[in-house]
Image (cartoon, grey):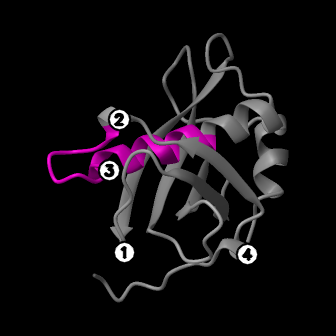
């Protein structure tokens, strides 16, 4: 266990539901640590696509993860239903820093808390660019 500050469910405006899968469990019988990063990616990208109109397949801009971390407080295991809370800690011109919480369905305290940074890049040049208006508007709604 860690003494890192744990966010609460009410700290998040957006909670993304996820059903854990059988193969998410590791040999110790709980969700493997690397799977949490997939949970984070799924929650954030669902928001950007559905609320911000980000076109991950043919859009001129894409977002790359350039930094990530996770603190674990309590294990979860298949077949638990979870929710990933997403909020924006910092919104820059071309980058955004997210804070995330992984909650068992209906619980107020997270099993894990994570953070990562997306940098938006121009797909053709692979160079950083300004966050497009649609995603920026969606991200602004997630500011803490």
Residue 73 got which mark?
1
- What whole-number distance in Å separates the C-alpha atoms at marks 3 and 2? 9 Å
- What whole-number distance in Å separates the C-alpha atoms at marks 3 and 1? 13 Å
State yes or no: discs 2 and 1 in contact (Cβ < 8 Å).
no
- What whole-number distance in Å separates the C-alpha atoms at marks 2 and 1? 21 Å
Of 30 and 110, the residue lying toward us: 30
Neighbour tally class for label 2: few under 14, some 14-19, many 20 plus, Cα within 10 Å:
few
Check residue 30 for magenta coloring: yes
Report which residue position mark 2 lands on.
22
Q: Is residue 113 visible?
A: yes
Report which residue position mark 3 lands on.
31
Helix, strand or loop under label 3: loop
Report which residue position mark 4 lands on.
10
Farthest bottom residue in view: 3
Q: Is residue 93 visible?
A: no
Q: Name the quadrant of the N terminus.
A: bottom left
Farthest left residue in view: 27
| Horizontal and vertical percent position of residue 94 | 63, 45
Q: Earlier in the sequence, mark 3 or mark 1?
A: 3
Chief secondary structure of the magenta portion? helix
Q: Is residue 125 above or below residue 99?
A: above
Q: Is residue 121 above or below residue 108?
A: above
| Horizontal and vertical percent position of residue 76 | 38, 59
């Amino acid at each position: 266990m860690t003494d890192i500050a744990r966010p609460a469910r009410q700290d998040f405006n957006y909670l993304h539901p996820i059903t854990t899968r059988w193969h998410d469990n590791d040999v110790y019988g709980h969700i493997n640590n690397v799977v949490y990063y997939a949970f984070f990616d799924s929650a954030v990208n669902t928001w950007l696509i559905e609320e911000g109109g980000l076109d991950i397949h043919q859009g001129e801009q894409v977002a790359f993860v350039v930094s990530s971390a996770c603190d674990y407080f309590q294990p979860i295991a298949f077949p638990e239903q979870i929710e990933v809370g997403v909020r924006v800690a910092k919104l820059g011109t071309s980058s955004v820093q997210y804070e995330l919480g992984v909650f068992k369905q209906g619980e107020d305290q997270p099993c894990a808390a994570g953070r990562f940074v997306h940098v938006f890049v121009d797909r053709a040049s692979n160079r950083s660019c300004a966050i497009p208006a649609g995603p920026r508007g969606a991200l602004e709604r997630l500011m803490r």
